[in-house]
Amino acid sequence: MVNVTTLVAFAFTVASVNAQVALYGQCGGQGYSQCLPGGSSGSTIKTTTTKAASTIKTTTTKVATTTVAPGTTTRRTTTTTVTTNSPNPTTNPSSGGSAAGVVGFATVGSGCSGGAGGSSVTVSSASALQAALSGDTPRIVYLNAAISNAGNLTIGSNKSLIGVGTSASLDKSSLSVRYGTKNVIIRNIKFTLCTGGDNDCITIKDPGTSNVWVDHCDFSGDMNANKDIYDGLIDVTREATLITISYNKFHNHHKALLFGSSSSAKEDVAIKVTVHHNYFTNIGSRTPSIRFGTTHVYNNFYDDVESCINVRDGSQNLIERNVFRNINKDVRADGGYCNLVDNDLGGGSVDCATGSFSKPPYSYTTDSTAAVLSNLIGSVGVGKI
């Protein structure tokens, strides 16, 4: 791993982003112009709109990274200054339970509304949480506690699990969405050192399991621990499909996102996941690693990741307008395919044959590559919904 020290401090304006972030025009696939020029928005790009002033907090930050090139003693410091607009944290248990804002594969088919239309309950213990998440009756469950050593908690269909404020957390615990469960929302929860079940923070698997949205959560582990003690942060396997993972922070962990059980599980061609507007930092690998299925990966920020996006075993991937920093191999192919559109590689490399997936079956809006940092830093993780 490249040795990286990251400092976040107050600074000046977003104007220097354009000076610091170099755009790289990447060859797209069918439906996109081939090899968009660096900085070009192309005919398909849309930009995000500003939010109401009453709900926005503006913060200007400077992100400085110092790297040591492998095999040398040369040190290089790169500074990126960004101005971020982020919503003020809410502690109101009446918010966050709806599917407003969900984009991506989770909207396909029957869609994702979670517990909308059902009753609401606020819980503060592991036993009460499990009871509230059980069954298929629509329900919005608000977690208003830091819970540890809860083992594996299972979620039934038609549920919204929403953390209250910034302190709702699951430590040394895990969540499972399994056995054909549908229509689940998980938002605003902090997950740390996950154990229990499959040792993943969130396990989404089994045929029929679908339409799950994981949004504005914080996931972390321990990079000093053996990489197999704490497994994945989110795993999607065994034909589970129609998943959206958005506005989360993934950090200090060996293995982040795994989609697909194994290189022999060809049935995982059913997996379809959208990964957008997430921040990955100090991660070993799997951001994501995808076998057989289909992913749309857009507007994410990757900083200090050993092995970044890994496309494997015939998977089809649209990788669009992401920003990479302090990464040697941004996209690595082991039998998978990808279409690359306007990514800022940050000096890293790509090894991937062009694939066939270029038009997702849903409407979505991308930020321009130059705007990814300013729109993302300060908007991901807990306390932002």
Image: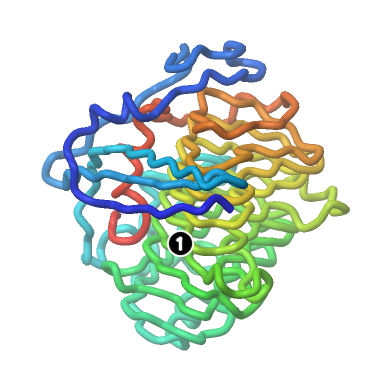
| Horizontal and vertical percent position of residue 144 | 31, 77
Image quadrant holding the C terminus, namely: bottom left
Image location (x, y in percent) of residue 223: 55, 68
Taking 219 as reference, is 358 above or below it?
above
Q: Residue at x 63, y 52 (%)?
A: 286
In the rendered view, does 346 fall on the left or right side of 317?
left
Q: How is the image coloured?
A: rainbow
- In front of the other: 123 or 376: 376
Q: Regarding mark 1 in the picture, which secondary structure is present there?
A: strand
88 or 331: nearer the viewer: 331
Q: To which residue does mark 1 refer?
A: 186
> Residue drawn 53% across and 76% down?
134
Q: Is residue 261 left or right of residue 294?
A: right
- Outermost residue on the front side: it is 73
Q: Amino acid at mark 1?
A: Ile
Vertical comparison of 150 with 174: above or below = below
User: Image quadrant of residue 369?
Assistant: top left
Identified at 50% across, 81% down, the residue is 130
Q: Nearer the viewer, residue 123 or 170?
A: 170
Report x, y in % for residue 64: 34, 45
- 239 relative position to 193: left or right: right
Residue, x 36% and y 69% (percent of image)? 119
* Residue located farthest toward the left when viewing the structure as drawn: 54
> In the picture provided, is 118 more to the left or to the right than 351?
left
